[in-house]
Image (spheres, helix red, strand yellow):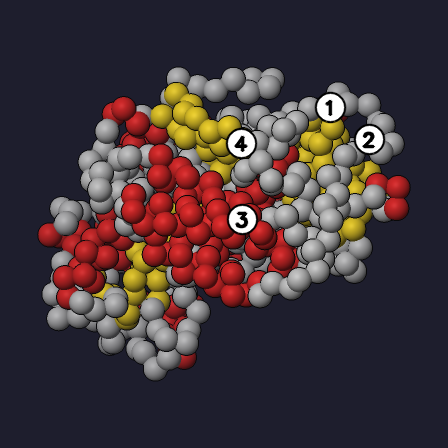
Amino acid sequence: MGKSTPRYLAAFDPKRLPHYFTDVLVIGGGLAGLRAANAVDPDWNVLVATKDLIDQSNSSYAQGGIAGVIDKEDRFESHVADTLAAGGPLCDRRVVEMVVREAPDRIRELIDWGTRFDQTDGGLRLGREGGHGYHRIVHALGDATGKEVMRAVIERTRARPNISIWENAFTLDLLTGGGQCRGAVVVDSHGRRCLVWAKQTILSTGGAGRLFRESTNPPVATGDGVAMAYRAGAQLRDLEFMQFHPTVLYIAGSSRSLITEAIRGEGGRLVDCTGHRFMTEYDARGELAPRDVVSQAIVTQMEKTLHPCVYLDLSSLDARLVRERFPGIDTVCRKFGLDLVKDPIPVRPGAHYMIGGVTVDAEGRTTLPGLWAAGEVTSSGLHGANRLASNSLLEGLVFGVHAGEGASAAARSTPDELRAHGVSNGEQPAIEEPLDLDDIRNSLQSLMWRAVGVRRTRAALAQAWNTVEQWHGYVLVRQFDDPSGWELQNMLTVARGMVRAALLREESRGVHLRTDFPESNDAWLSHISHERDEATGTERHGRVELAGLSLPGS
């Protein structure tokens, strides 16, 4: 994000590469991307490029469900109020109301597409999670909602003759020209670079949880979409807001498996290493307080007890129902000799969901003409400073529809132009001296966890800034020819923006806790934005007031 930042990650010669033309390019194969692809008019060709297999995304790993007003006793106003209470004044109330009111239709649509949500007494089984005033969460396969939803959506997508899917295709960068997005540079599954020219492009690459040592995210969550949008000149916003899930399985040698908060919704209790139930000392809602409150309480309790974790206690619950409701978590625990019902389950917070990202309006339109975005890669105004549980898959569905329909309409008004536009590829000289990329990546993840984790201070953030700047200076100028290098460059780009934003926001709000500024300050009721001037390669950052944004075509 500095003057030396190259425009493109890798040099290329447009005259030596194959070219591919499509009406709409969707980058990312999670729920938001596939829902967007399905919203495009069947008359238009769509290409979905995803850097792993189509079922490897945060969406597929989602244990929690989808929030929506389904029960006749529930009200839209209650779901809106719960969302605003969690996210605070940085939520855009218009966006919150739009998403909440569309939720039932999006859930019914998934059912029509073959999603098998859990049932009870002939109707949907509705769960309750932290921050929700009603039982309004639909789940599937107990604790594997994302897996079942993605199965149904992938099947529908593959059945659409106008949609092509490139798996194991790494998108290096967005192509720009004439002040708008023209498509992307994509490395296909055979390692060949090609230029994909699109009338409209939709970004749905997910978040950046892998920036942190402790994370619930799969390996693909390295912030690629946020970084490539930044390099292309799109505005980023709210990067300081990274949500940490309070309960991540903490066992040496295991992956950091998510322990869904639906367990707490069913009555699971949090206790410390002495067996003391502590949450009511921090919030009257106890274990059902919003995620930021629970995460911060757990960290405090760990410090008080000088213990590396706390524990989930399910011993008071019906064993049969627990195993039936959470089969995936039960299986993981058994691998490490733990009985989910009888044994205390060790947990601690981990990076879970990136609230900030590419600025979009209610239709999914970014500040770069020709580029749309949906899902975790965005800053949409739905989550404010803290995401309410089970609003993430919902956001991907709603904004996927809006972005897909918007891109489709824009493509309809754009005539076919099957030619390559002039591209300045910003070729950089190759640097032969090798780098230990794993060492830098591990060091980055540890640094981000220490300095930009649940608790933050100016001193730690300043140290992180200096360190990331140093890495940035000699890693970003290099040429790599494989995803490990490109991912590291993207992670450093996003980390730099995240550290800067966390330094600038001198208050505590939602998931952003500055212990040196422990109170919220109304002087900071604005968004912190970042963008790159494509002409000069320099960065602009500032504050965007809550009154609204002026986006192209708004």
Label 3–label 2 contact, CB within 8 A: no
Question: Which of label 4 and label 2 is nearer to you?
Answer: 4
Q: Quadrant of the C terminus?
A: top right
Label 4–label 3 contact, CB within 8 A: no
Q: Residue at x 85, y 28 (%)?
A: 417
Q: Please report whichever mark, 4 or 3, sits nearer to the chain's N-terminal start.
A: 3
The residue labelled by disc 1 is 178
- Going by the numbered disc 3, the residue's amino acid type is His
Of 212 and 153, the residue lying toward us: 212
Measuring from the top left, give residue 102's x and y in whole percent: 47, 32
- Going by the numbered disc 2, the residue's amino acid type is His
Question: Which of label 1 and label 4 is nearer to you?
Answer: 4
Measuring from the top left, give residue 340's x and y in whole percent: 30, 73
Question: Which of label 3 and label 2 is nearer to you?
Answer: 3
Residue 353, can we see it? no
- Mark number, residue 421: 2
Q: Please report whichever mark, 2 or 1, sits nearer to the chain's N-terminal start.
A: 1
Quarter of the image where one finds residue 314: bottom left
509 is higher (above) or lower (below) than 463:
above
The residue labelled by disc 4 is 539
Label 4–label 2 contact, CB within 8 A: no
